[in-house]
Amino acid sequence: MRSLGATSRRIEREQRRRQRELEKPRIFYEKMQEQEKAILEAQLYENRIDIILSVHRECGELCDWASIQTNPPPEKPSLSRNHEEMAQGRIRSGLPLQKRFLSITEAQLKYRLKRSDIEIEFEKERRRIVPAAASRLDCIFVADNEDTIKSNIQRSLRSHCSRSEAYRGFEIYQSGFWMV
Amino acid sequence: MKLIEALRFTKADFGWFEEYSREKDKRLIEGYWTSHQFRENVNSWEYLVDGIIRADDPSGSEKVRSYYNNIKYEYN
């Protein structure tokens, strides 16, 4: 019995010792975390103080006001009218409107082409027989202001006609409809 | 409706067009574009205009609007 009791005590001691050994790294780990947290906090605090104090230590680039004063003034930028001229050129050639027309009339033209092969045949023959005749093909033109209609549409239409052999259609305008 | 500008104007008999849908003969197309009458005493002339027509009255606007809507509908 004595030897049994001694054995059980020895086992218990072993377990306690083992437990203490296992506890050691956990405590160490927790301490490490606390330490690291403290270090970080300290660093943040120092950084903040550094930022606040930097006003007294740092300054921007030095300006040589005297040389700036004696320097000649910068060259006046020359106005480039490239884009304006290009736009004017496009208007003169009727391209912007034509483009707009084509984008709008695409569906309509497709519709016409899809709807009637006869119309297409007539159109082809018109080009051969009497190219100066008005077209049977319709298309829709849309303009957003009266100036566009009065000044540009006719020019664009002529340009459009010369290239596409004259389409007939109509134009929708705010106050009414314009047929071209 | 008011015709504002006519760049091109063509008078043609629609009878040729209708007939061509029945019988595919190129001479029918030629008859159409040379502005010949298809049948005597039958008025089926149509007038093609490349130009600008303004519909500034409500009924005219509505007429063109419905035409436009129909086209869109047919296309879809």
Image (spheres, rainbow, N blue to C red):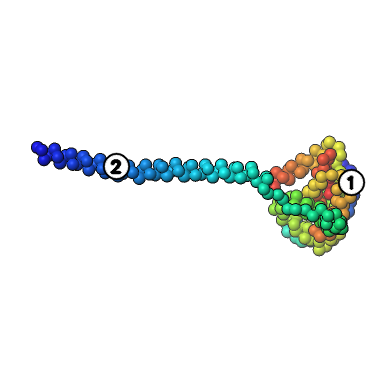
View extreme (left): residue: A1
Say which element carries label 2: helix
What amino acid is labelled 2 in the image? Arg
Describe residue A80's horizontal placement relative to residue A59 as left or right: right
A93 relative to A143, above or below: below
A34 relative to A165, above or below: above
**Labels 2 and 1 share a subunit:** no
User: How far from the left and from the top, in percent, is residue A109?
Assistant: 74, 52
* The disc label shown at residue A65, or none: none
Q: Nearer the viewer, residue B73 or A20?
A: A20
Question: Mark 2 — residue?
Answer: A20
Alpha-carbon span between mark 2 and mark 1: 107 Å
Residue A83 appears in the picture as rendered: yes
Q: Nearer the viewer, residue A98 or A167?
A: A98
User: How far from the left and from the top, in percent, is residue A26?
Assistant: 36, 43
What amino acid is labelled 1 in the image? Leu
Tags 2 and 1 touching, CB below 8 Å: no
Q: Mark 2 Cα within 10 Å, few/some/many (few <14, many 20+)?
A: few
A47 relative to A121, above or below: above
Question: Mark 1 — residue?
Answer: B3
